[in-house]
Amino acid sequence: MTTSGSLRSKSGRGPTRRRSRPSSKTGVSTAQARSLLDTVYPRLARVAEDRRYTGSALGPGIAGGLIAAVVGGFLWGLIVILSGYEIGIAAWGVGFLAGFGVVRFAGGAKGTPLQVVAVVSSVLGIVIGKYISYAYFFKQAVSDRFDVDISYFDSEIFRAFRENLGDVFGGFDLIWAGFAVVTAWRLTRPSGFTSRGRLGV
């Protein structure tokens, strides 16, 4: 007869314990999987806890988003001015920079409030980039026609930019802006890993 949790060998020398057989699909036994889980799970739990959003991360996150918006927008505007072309993928880069800046300044924290900050920052950066390139060519046109040098922050430029937003932002601009927003949102999205409870195998 067999005893609970053991098998008797054919030679009668006593019970032999069941060995954990590796899975036919993965080649990893249940015991090995449990050992790996016990090692990796606490580390993932610590990372999730460290990156959990807290109210103290909002202020630095906003600062990081604003800095990223200004820097990203300026760089994109500069690329347009130097090349004479609007490189749409650069707008996507503004979204990446916004998400990265928010997470970086927030100390690695992620959460819905920071996602909102990253999205707003990416849109702001795109608008800044568009305005810089628009203002440059507007100034150039005024200078060529009237031989007058006006400031980038002249009220006439602001008014013209606002009234012509439909022309400034074309269909492809909106597509790239959408990519930028999605990227900023995903970079600041929590991992979804919870440090509560324990997984079993």
Image (tube, rainbow, N blue to C red):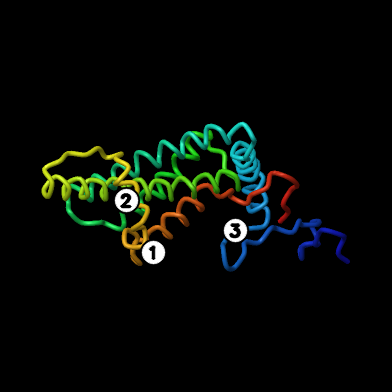
**Vertical arrangement, residue 178 with respect to residue 148, above or below:** below
**Element assignment for label 1:** helix
Residue picked out by circle 2: 130
- Disc 3 and disc 1 in contact, CB within 8 angstroms: no
State the image coordinates of residue 104 (x, y, percent, origin top left).
47, 36
Image depth: mark 3 or mark 2 in front: 2
Q: Residue at x 58, y 36 (%)?
A: 58
State the image coordinates of residue 126 (x, y, percent, origin top left).
37, 50
Quadrant location, the N terminus? bottom right
State the image coordinates of residue 32 (x, y, percent, origin top left).
63, 52
**Vertical arrangement, residue 147 with respect to residue 3, above or below:** above
Residue picked out by circle 3: 28
Residue picked out by circle 1: 175
The residue type indicated by label 1 comes to Ile
**Element assignment for label 3:** loop
Q: Residues within 10 Å of mark 2 (few under 14, many from 20)?
A: many
Image depth: mark 3 or mark 1 in front: 1
